Image (tube, rainbow, N blue to C red):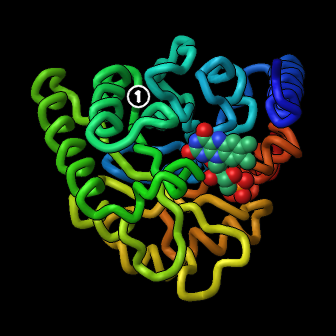
């Protein structure tokens, strides 16, 4: 039996799928609005992305380019997730990030093993990987306050990245998704930067005070890029983050409530594309 929350999510996903199908039907082959940016050694067609949670398993990837974004972050995928064919595309489509994590409930070395294994699973299909440390589970389990666990995780992630680069001959940047919260800099944020991860997907929480503004985080992180997510609902806020030093921005709620058309309008606005 599904809980009311699960049913609400299922309904929201079905609605999004329908809106994307309709948008694709009427806007066949519309190109992605272009304003290329180079981040983590990758060329993103534009700086707007869809955050993890929109397409948890990769089932909607082929439809979500209707939103005109430069990147899609599929997931969070863990060893128990149903996996659809998650595959990056050649050519001009949005770049594909794969957000990976451990099974909810896994702890300690087991959680580290699962995350590192997921890097192996998605190395060939992802343009970039993001290790998710931002879910309520990580806080409840005390993982993001445990310097020993975080140190072990980031060290294993970096050595797995090196191993996979030499095995496959392709470098895949690896970011960490963390909450931006006081005290600044938080432990996972500081440790991810010091471990040499390629980027930070930083979640700005509603009501966060100025000590944790995306602008402050971006300048503290530089040259490590900040992908800013949380509370971006219009072009004013998206521009504020980008002008404040975020390399990319992502939206979740905007696409779930406004559908792909609202996100496409935002992408066009950010790219200065007036007509389609
Ligand atoms: C229902 C729901 C499910 C989410 N699932 C995930 C997830 O699986 N992985 C993840 O990293 N973030 C997940 N997120 C967080 C979003 O990616 C995003 O960081 C957050 O919603 C803030 O962005 P927004 O203000 O644009 O909604 C989820 C958020 C919501 C509301």
Between 222 and 115, the one lying in front of the other is 115
Residue 42 sits above or below residue 218 on the image: above
Q: Position of residue 199 (x, y in %)?
A: 37, 56
For the point 83% across and 36% down, which residue is it? 5
Q: Position of residue 226 (x, y in %)?
A: 45, 63
Between 200 and 127, the one lying in front of the other is 200
Quarter of the N terminus within the rendering:
top right
For the point 54% across and 55% down, which residue is it? 140
- Ligand 1 within 8 A of label 1's CB? no
- SS at mark 1? loop
Residue 23 occupies quadrant: top right
| Residue picked out by circle 1 | 126
Residue 26 sits above or below residue 128 on the image: above
Most extreme residue toward the top, as rendered?
85
Between 179 and 142, the one lying in front of the other is 142
Q: Is residue 179 left or right of residue 129?
A: right
Crowd band around label 1 with a 10 angstrom C-alpha radius: few (<14), some (14–19), many (20+): many
For the point 88% across and 27% down, which residue is it? 11
Residue 16 occupies quadrant: top right
Q: Position of residue 115 (x, y in %)?
A: 35, 34
């Amino acid at each position: 039996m599904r809980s009311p929350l699960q049913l609400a999510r299922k309904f929201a996903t079905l609605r999004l799928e329908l809106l994307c199908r309709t948008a694709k039907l009427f806007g066949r082959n519309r190109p992605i609005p272009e304003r290329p940016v180079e981040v983590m050694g990758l060329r993103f067609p534009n700086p707007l992305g869809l955050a993890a949670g929109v397409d948890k398993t990769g089932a909607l990837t082929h439809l979500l380019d209707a939103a005109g974004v430069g990147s899609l972050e599929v997931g969070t995928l863990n060893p128990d997730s149903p996996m659809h064919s998650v595959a990056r595309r050649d050519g001009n489509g949005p770049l594909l990030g794969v957000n990976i994590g451990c099974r909810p409930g896994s702890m300690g070395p087991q959680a580290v093993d699962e995350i590192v294994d997921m890097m192996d699973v998605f190395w060939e299909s992802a343009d970039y990987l993001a290790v998710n440390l931002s879910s309520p589970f990580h806080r409840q389990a005390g993982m993001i306050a445990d310097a020993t666990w975080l140190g072990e995780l980031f060290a294993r992630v970096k050595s797995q990245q090196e191993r996979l680069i030499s095995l496959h001959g392709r470098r895949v940047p690896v970011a960490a998704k963390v909450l931006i919260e006081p005290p600044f800099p938080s432990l996972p944020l500081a440790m991810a930067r010091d471990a040499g991860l390629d980027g930070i997907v930083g979640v700005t929480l509603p009501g966060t005070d100025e000590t944790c503004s995306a602008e402050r985080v971006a300048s503290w992180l530089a040259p490590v890029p900040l992908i800013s997510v949380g509370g971006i609902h219009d072009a004013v806020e998206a521009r504020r983050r980008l002008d404040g030093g975020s390399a990319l921005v992502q939206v979740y709620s905007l696409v779930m409530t406004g559908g792909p058309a609202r996100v496409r309008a935002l992408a066009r606005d950010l790219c200065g594309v007036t007509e389609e």
